Each structure stands twice: as structure tokens, then as C-alpha cells.
Amino acid sequence: MLLGKVVYIAGLLLQIVIRYPYRRGRKEQKDRQEQLLLLLLTVGGLLLPLIYIFTNWLAFADYQPLLWLTGAGVLVMAAGLWLFWRSHADLGDNWSDTLAIREDHVLVTQGAYRRIRHPMYSASWLIMIAQALLLANWIAGFGGIVAFGVMYFLRVPKEEQMMQERFGEQYRRYMATTGRVIPKYPVR
Ligand code: SAH
């Protein structure tokens, strides 16, 4: 369905635009695992969809698109982009595309970070789910969820370990009042 492809490409361009101001001047060293995870994410979340959209090489894995699934994909993509934008704005200079602590790092606990510890990863989950809903192809559609899933489950424990080493009790208290990717509301 053309609508799904167009919305997927628009979403891709908006992610680049949202992230661009935070990228400038950032060139962190990445360890082997991080390099492989970012490569996997590029294949599943970008390369396979582009191959599907611009060639017929993946046509064998096409299925019949359904308008209501595509429509749901548009809404999920919009929600994901909104959260992607808000979490970049709130994380500001503390953002990096790999795991890194800056000298002047501050722990952000407000805005998108108030009830979720990893709102940018929540946004990525939404965008990957949108990819699956928008692209009517088993390989290009689900490539993003598989690649991001591997990355998420390998990276988040390391990231939280790193944050605890840097921020200690402050991060542990923050963990108690937030959910990883789903908002946590305190029980009264
Ligand atoms: N996991 C976060 C941030 C992704 S960017 C999210 O999904 O929103 C990755 C970098 O963000 C990591 O190198 C880490 O140093 C930093 N980071 C993660 N959580 C943070 C927080 N609450 N405050 C400040 N920096 C944070």
C-alpha cells in the first residue's frame, strides 16, 4: 500500500530531522557489541524497508495490506515521533547514540523522563511497531522489531548499570518511581 510506504519514509525523515541538532560534534568510541547492535538496527530498521520500498527483491514475502492496519500504523508512528521528539528535547546534551557518560552529565528525571526511564527506547518500540503495521511484508515489516528487540534487551541492563555506577542512590531512587519503557504511576 502506497500510503504505508509514504508514511514510513516521512517518519524516517522526521527522525533524522529531530535527531540532527543533537548529533553535531558527537563521535563516541563504540565497543564491538555496540557496533554490531547498531549495524543490526540499520539493517532491520532501515535497509530492509528501503529495499522493500524501492526494489521488488522482497516481493516473495509480501502479504495483502489491510487499510485498518495501515491506519493504525499512521497513529502509532505519530505517537512514536512525538515521544522521540520530546525525549530528545528533555535529554538534551546528555544524549549519545551509544552508552556514554559525559563529564558534565546530569540525571534527567523530568518531562518525558518523569515516569519512564527510557522514553527514547519507548519511542523506538512505537516506531518499530509502526514499521510492521505500515509495510505489508513479513521481512521488511518485522525486521525493525527483531533488530531493536535484540538491541533493547542487551543494552538496557548495561545502561542502567552504568547509570547506577555514576549516579548511585539518586538513580536507584529514580528507578523505584519509574517504569523502563511503560509509564509507572505511583500507587496511592
Ligand atoms: N535510554 C534513554 C536514553 C537513550 S540515549 C532513553 O531511552 O530515553 C543513551 C544515553 O543516555 C546513555 O549513554 C546514558 O548516558 C544517557 N541516559 C540514559 N538515561 C538518562 C537519564 N535519565 N538522564 C541522563 N542521561 C541518561
Image (tube, helix red, strand yellow):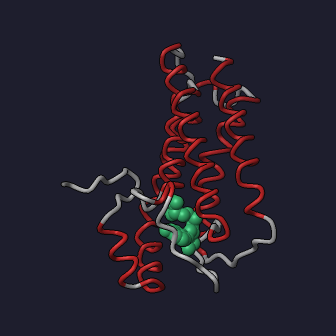
Q: Is residue 84 visible?
A: yes
Q: Is residue 152 left or right of residue 5?
A: left
Question: Which residue is rendered at x = 48% and y = 15% of the image?
Answer: 68
Question: Which residue is rendered at x = 76% and y = 29% of the image?
Answer: 54
Q: Is residue 151 visible?
A: no
User: In the current view of this chain or complex, which residue is farthest to the front?
Assistant: 188
Q: Nearer the viewer, residue 96 or 131?
A: 96
Against 122, residue 71 (above or below) is: above
Number of numbered labels in the structure image: 0
Question: Which residue is rendered at x = 64% and y = 86% of the image?
Answer: 103
Q: Is residue 46 left or right of residue 107?
A: right
Q: Position of residue 187 (x, y in %)?
A: 20, 54
Image quadrant in which the N terminus is located: top right
Image quadrant in which the C terminus is located: bottom left
Q: Position of residue 55 (x, y in %)?
A: 75, 29
Against 148, residue 70 (above or below) is: above
Within the displayed image, which quadrant is ligand 1 positioned in?
A: bottom right
User: In the current view of this chain or complex, which residue is farthest to the left?
Assistant: 188
Against 175, residue 141 (above or below) is: above
Q: Nearer the viewer, residue 187 or 87?
A: 187
Question: Which residue is rendered at x = 71% and y = 25% of the image?
Answer: 6
Asked which quadrant contains residue 21, the reply is bottom right
Q: Position of residue 89 (x, y in %)?
A: 64, 56
Q: Position of residue 18 (x, y in %)?
A: 71, 49
Against 154, residue 67 (above or below) is: above
Q: Nearer the viewer, residue 82 or 51?
A: 82
Asked which quadrant contains residue 31, the reply is bottom right
